[in-house]
C-alpha cells in the first residue's frame, strides 16, 4: 500500500491510470453495448458478391472502399439495416441528388440486397436487420399510439400521413411502409430522421409503434371517408366546395322555382 | 283549399247534418283553429303581429338564402349540441380509458377526452351527431362569410342598414370564437395544441399578457380549469349572445323590409316577392330540412375531427398538420407569414410582435375596417337616401374592386395557414411557399383591385351596348335597295329594366378653398380630401342609359352615333339603321312609326 502511494508521482503513473481507464471503458462498452442481431454474416461468398454489386452501383459516390466520396457518406459502420432500408425502399441507388432521396422503384432483387447488406456489414459493426418477430405487429397498439404521438407525430402526422419539413424536405407517409423498413428507419435514422436506438425506444417499443401504425392502416374509419387524415385543411376545403356548393345549388333551384 | 272546394265540403257536411238537431250552435268562422287563435289573441294581442308576419313579403333570389343557411345551421348546432352535452364531461380530471375502442385501451386521458371518445364509439348515433355538429359549424361560418360578401357587393349595408351590418360583423366574430372554443373542448391532441397556441397569443400581449393567461387558465398551462370554463362559455354565454344578436339582426330585417335586386316593378318603396304565408313559409321551411339533410348526409359519409386518432392531449405532444378549423385559418396564416425580426428585447422585456400582430391585433383591425366601410362610402358619396334596391356589383366598380382585394388578402392568409399541406401535396418547399405568399399578400390585392375594377367597367359598357344596340342575332338582311345589315334584337322592357335601374354617383367637384371674402374657409381641407376620394371612386363612371339615349338609339341610328360621337361610324349608320327601310317592327319589334331616313 505504502509503496503504491509512494509511486503515485512516478512519471509513468499518469500513463498507467490512463491505460486502466481506457481498458475499463472499453471493457464495459464491450459488455453492455447493444448486440447486433445477425449483422456480420460469416458468409464470405455473399460478402464478395455484395462487394461486386457495390463496386458496380454504389462506389461512384460512396468510394471504392465505401469510405465516403464526393457525393456520398462513408458506409463503414452503418450496418445491414441501413442498406436494407435505403436499397429496399428504392431510395438508393440515388438517380440524382436532391434535397431528399425519395422512395422509388426497387432496383435490386432481395437476394442482391442481402448481399449488399452483408458486404456493408462486413466493413464495420452496425445495426443489423431486425427479426420478423419485431416487425410484423402483435404489439400493444395503445402504448404504441402514445409512443408514436410523443416521438413521431410531430413530423409524420397523427395518423402517419406524412408532413412537411423545411426547404422541400418532408416526412413521408407511413401507410405503405413495411414493418421491417419502419424498424430499420427508427434504428438508423435515415436523412432528416433522428436515430431511435434501443436505449431510446426499446425493441418492444418499436414493435408497439409498428403495430399501432399497422392498425391505423387496416382499421376502418368509423366516421366515413377520412379525407386523407390530414387534419382540418381538407375538412375546410370540403365544407367550402361540396358542402356549401350543394346548398347553393339547391338555393338556386328554389329561387328559380318561383319564376 | 279553394273557395269552390270549401263550398263543396260545406254542402256535403250540410247534407250529412240534415237530420241533426237544428239548435246546434252554428259553426263559427275559422273552426277550432280559429277559436284557439282568437283565444290566444284575446289574452296576448298577438293577432296583429302574426298577421303582419304572415303577410310579410320576401323577394326571391338564391343569394338571399345564404343568410338562411346560416340561420338553419345555427338551429342544427343548437339541437346537435344539446345532444352532445348529455354525455360530454367538461373536466380535466385524469382517468384511464376503459371503453370499447381498443387502440386507446388503458391510456391515461382527461375525462373530457374520454367522454368524447365514449360519445363517438359507444353512444348510439353519437358519432353521427358529433359529426353533424362539427360539419354544421363549418358550414355555419362558410354561409356567414358568403352572406357577408353578398351584402357587401350589393351595397345592402347602405342606409338604413348600417347597424345591421355591424350586428352581422359581431355575429361573424362570435361565431368564429364559438367555433374555436368548441374545437378546444374534446381535449384531443389537436384541440390541446389549439389551446396552447392561444395561450401563446395571450402571452404575446405586452405587459399584461402573462397576467391574462394566468387569469384565464387559473394558473399555469394547462391546469385544471380551462376545459370547464370553455364549456360554460361554449354552451351558455356565446350561444346566448349569438341568439340575442341574431334576433336583433332578424328584427331589423323585418323593420327595414327585405332588399331586392333591380327588376321590373321593383322600386325603393316596394318589395316584390311572395308573402310569408303560405309560399315563403313552405319554401323556407323546406330549405331548413334541405340544409339539415345535406349536413346529415355529409356527416354520415365524411369523417371530421377523428379525435380517437388524434389521441389525448399532453403538452409534450404535437402532430404535423396542426391547423385550426378553417375560419381561424387566416389568423394562423398571418402568424406563419409574419417575419421573425418583429420579436425583440427592450426594457428587459420580450416584445413578440411577430405573434401579436397576427393573433391579437389583426382581427380587431379587420373588423373595424369592415365596420366603418359603410360610413366611409357614405361620406364619399354624400348620399343620404335610403336604399332598398340593391346594386349589381358591376355598377359600383370601386367598391367591388375593394371588396375583391380584401377577399384576396384574406384568401392568401387563409392559404398560408395550409402551407405545410400545400408543400407535401404539391411537392414544393415550404419556405418558397411562405416567401411567395409574403409578396403576394401585398401585391395580389392591388392587382386584383385593378383587374376587377376594369372588369366591372367593361361589363357596364357591354350592358350599355346591349341596351342601345340590342342583341346581335347573326341574321343578315338585304333591303330592296341592295343594302345588307344585321338584325339587332331589342331587349324587352323586362330585360331592359334590370340594366337601366341604377344610380351612378358623379365625382364631387372641388369646393372653393376660400369664401366670398377671399378668406380660407373652415374645413376646406377636409372637403378637398373628400372630393379627391370621390373623384377616385367615380372618375371613370359609366352613366346608365337614359330614356332619351334609348329613344335615340331606337328611332335613329345616326342620332345614337352622334351621341356616342363616333364620327366614322356615323357615315355608315346603316349597319343597324337599315332596319328603317323594311319597317321597324321587323328588326326591333317596336311599333312606333317614323319616317324613312333615306
Image (spheres, coloured by chain):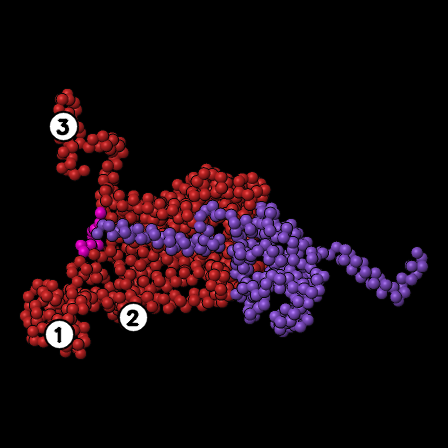
Chain colours: A purple, B red
Residue A190's tag is none
Which stretch did the figure color magenta? B264-274
Q: Regarding mark 1 in the picture, which secondary structure is present there?
A: strand
> Relative to residue B273, is residue B234 drawn left or right?
right
How many numbered markers are drawn?
Answer: 3
Q: CA distance from mark 3 to mark 1?
A: 74 Å
Q: Is residue B376 above or below residue B7?
A: below
Q: Contact (CB < 8 A) between labels 3 and 1?
A: no
Asked if residue B567 is among those painted magenta in the image, a careful observer would answer no
Q: Residue B384, image x and y in percent?
A: 26, 58
Q: Secondary structure at mark 3?
A: helix
Q: Residues within 10 Å of mark 2 (few under 14, many from 20)?
A: some
Q: Is residue B144 above or below residue B513?
A: above
Task: Report the chain holding disc 1.
Answer: B
Q: Residues within 10 Å of mark 3 (few under 14, many from 20)?
A: few
CA distance for labels 3 and 2 = 86 Å
Name the spot of residue B553 as percent of width and height, x first.
14, 69
The x, y position of residue B123, in whole percent, is 47, 38
Residue annotated with mark 1: B484
In the rendered image, which quarter contains the N terminus of chain B? Answer: top left
Check the residue under mark 3 and report the chain it is in: B
Q: Which comes before the other along the chain, label 1 or label 2?
A: 1
* Same chain assignment for discs 1 and 2: yes
Which residue, given by chain and number where applicable, does mark 3 sit on?
B14
Q: Are marks 3 and 2 on the same chain?
A: yes
Amino acid at each position: 500500500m505504502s509503496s503504491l502511494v509512494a509511486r503515485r508521482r512516478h512519471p509513468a503513473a499518469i500513463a498507467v491510470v490512463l491505460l486502466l481507464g481506457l481498458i475499463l471503458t472499453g471493457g464495459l462498452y464491450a459488455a453492455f453495448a447493444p448486440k447486433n442481431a445477425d449483422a456480420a454474416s460469416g458468409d464470405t461468398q455473399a460478402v464478395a458478391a455484395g462487394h461486386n454489386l457495390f463496386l458496380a452501383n454504389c462506389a461512384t459516390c460512396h468510394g471504392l472502399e465505401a469510405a465516403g466520396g464526393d457525393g456520398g457518406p462513408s458506409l463503414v459502420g452503418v450496418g445491414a439495416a441501413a442498406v436494407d432500408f435505403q436499397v429496399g425502399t428504392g431510395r438508393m441507388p440515388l438517380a440524382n441528388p436532391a434535397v431528399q432521396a425519395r422512395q422509388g422503384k426497387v432496383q435490386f432483387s432481395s437476394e442482391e440486397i442481402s448481399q449488399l447488406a452483408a458486404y456493408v456489414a462486413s466493413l464495420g459493426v452496425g445495426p443489423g436487420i431486425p427479426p420478423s418477430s419485431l416487425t410484423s405487429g402483435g404489439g400493444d397498439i395503445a402504448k404504441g399510439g402514445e409512443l408514436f404521438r410523443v416521438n413521431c407525430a410531430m413530423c409524420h402526422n397523427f395518423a402517419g400521413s406524412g408532413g412537411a419539413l423545411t426547404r422541400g424536405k418532408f416526412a413521408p407517409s407511413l401507410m405503405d411502409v413495411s414493418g421491417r423498413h419502419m424498424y430499420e428507419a427508427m434504428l438508423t435514422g435515415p436523412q432528416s430522421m433522428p436515430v431511435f436506438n434501443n436505449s431510446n425506444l426499446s425493441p418492444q417499443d418499436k414493435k408497439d409503434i409498428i403495430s399501432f401504425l399497422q392498425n391505423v392502416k387496416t382499421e376502418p374509419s368509423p366516421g366515413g371517408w377520412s379525407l386523407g387524415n390530414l387534419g382540418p385543411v381538407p375538412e375546410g376545403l370540403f365544407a367550402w366546395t361540396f358542402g356549401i356548393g350543394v346548398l347553393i345549388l339547391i338555393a338556386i333551384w328554389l329561387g328559380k322555382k318561383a319564376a | 283549399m279553394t273557395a269552390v272546394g270549401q263550398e263543396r265540403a260545406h254542402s256535403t257536411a250540410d247534407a250529412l247534418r240534415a237530420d241533426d238537431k237544428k239548435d246546434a250552435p252554428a259553426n263559427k268562422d275559422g273552426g277550432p283553429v280559429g277559436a284557439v287563435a282568437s283565444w290566444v289573441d284575446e289574452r296576448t294581442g298577438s293577432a296583429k303581429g302574426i298577421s303582419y308576419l304572415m303577410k310579410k313579403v320576401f323577394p326571391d333570389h338564391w343569394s338571399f338564402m345564404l343568410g338562411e343557411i346560416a340561420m338553419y345551421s345555427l338551429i342544427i348546432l343548437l339541437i346537435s349540441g344539446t345532444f352532445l352535452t348529455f354525455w360530454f364531461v367538461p373536466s380535466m380530471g385524469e382517468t384511464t380509458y376503459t371503453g370499447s375502442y381498443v387502440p386507446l385501451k388503458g391510456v391515461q386521458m382527461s375525462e373530457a377526452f374520454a367522454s368524447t371518445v365514449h360519445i363517438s364509439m359507444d353512444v348510439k348515433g353519437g358519432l353521427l351527431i358529433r359529426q353533424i355538429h362539427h360539419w354544421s359549424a363549418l358550414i355555419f361560418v362558410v354561409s356567414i362569410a358568403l352572406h357577408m360578401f353578398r351584402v357587401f357587393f350589393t351595397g345592402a349595408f347602405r342606409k338604413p342598414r348600417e347597424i345591421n351590418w355591424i350586428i352581422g360583423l359581431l355575429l361573424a366574430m362570435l361565431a368564429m370564437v364559438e367555433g374555436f372554443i368548441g374545437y378546444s373542448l374534446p381535449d384531443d391532441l389537436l384541440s390541446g395544441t389549439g389551446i396552447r397556441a392561444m395561450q401563446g397569443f395571450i402571452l404575446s400581449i405586452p405587459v399584461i399578457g402573462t397576467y391574462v393567461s394566468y387569469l384565464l387558465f387559473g394558473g399555469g398551462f394547462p391546469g385544471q380549469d380551462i376545459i370547464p370554463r370553455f364549456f360554460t362559455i361554449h354552451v351558455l354565454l356565446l350561444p346566448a349572445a349569438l341568439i340575442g344578436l341574431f334576433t336583433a339582426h332578424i328584427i331589423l330585417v323585418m323593420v327595414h323590409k327585405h332588399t331586392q335586386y333591380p327588376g321590373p316593378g321593383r322600386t325603393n318603396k316596394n318589395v316584390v316577392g311572395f308573402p310569408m304565408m303560405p309560399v315563403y313559409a313552405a319554401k323556407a321551411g323546406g330549405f331548413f330540412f334541405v340544409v339539415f339533410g345535406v349536413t346529415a348526409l355529409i356527416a354520415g359519409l365524411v369523417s371530421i375531427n377523428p379525435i380517437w386518432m388524434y389521441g389525448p392531449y399532453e403538452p409534450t405532444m404535437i402532430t404535423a398538420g396542426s391547423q385550426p378549423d378553417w375560419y381561424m385559418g387566416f389568423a394562423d396564416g398571418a402568424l406563419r407569414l409574419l417575419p421573425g425580426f418583429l420579436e425583440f428585447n427592450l426594457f428587459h422585456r420580450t416584445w413578440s410582435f411577430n405573434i401579436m400582430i397576427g393573433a391579437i391585433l389583426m382581427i380587431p383591425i379587420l373588423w373595424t375596417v369592415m365596420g366603418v366601410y359603410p360610413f366611409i362610402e357614405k361620406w364619399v358619396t354624400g348620399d343620404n337616401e335610403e336604399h332598398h334596391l340593391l346594386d349589381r356589383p358591376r355598377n359600383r366598380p370601386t367598391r367591388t374592386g375593394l371588396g375583391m382585394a380584401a377577399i384576396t388578402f384574406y384568401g392568401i392568409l387563409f392559404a398560408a395557414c395550409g402551407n405545410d399541406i400545400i408543400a407535401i401535396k404539391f411537392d414544393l418547399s415550404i419556405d418558397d411557399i411562405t416567401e411567395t405568399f409574403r409578396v403576394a399578400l401585398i401585391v395580389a390585392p392591388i392587382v386584383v383591385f385593378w383587374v376587377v375594377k376594369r372588369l366591372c367597367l367593361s361589363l357596364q359598357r357591354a350592358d350599355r351596348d346591349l341596351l342601345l344596340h340590342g342583341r346581335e342575332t347573326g341574321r343578315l338582311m338585304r333591303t330592296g335597295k341592295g343594302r345588307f345589315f344585321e338584325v339587332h334584337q331589342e331587349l324587352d322592357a323586362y330585360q331592359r329594366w334590370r340594366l337601366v335601374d341604377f344610380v351612378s354617383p358623379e365625382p364631387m367637384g372641388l369646393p372653393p378653398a376660400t369664401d366670398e371674402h377671399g378668406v380660407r374657409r373652415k374645413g376646406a381641407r377636409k372637403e378637398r380630401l373628400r372630393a379627391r376620394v370621390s373623384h377616385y371612386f367615380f372618375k371613370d363612371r359609366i352613366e346608365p342609359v337614359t330614356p332619351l339615349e334609348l329613344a335615340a338609339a331606337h328611332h335613329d341610328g345616326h342620332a345614337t352615333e352622334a351621341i356616342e360621337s363616333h364620327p366614322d361610324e356615323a357615315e355608315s349608320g346603316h349597319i343597324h339603321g337599315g332596319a328603317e327601310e323594311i319597317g321597324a317592327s321587323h328588326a326591333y319589334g317596336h311599333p312606333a312609326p317614323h319616317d324613312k331616313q333615306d
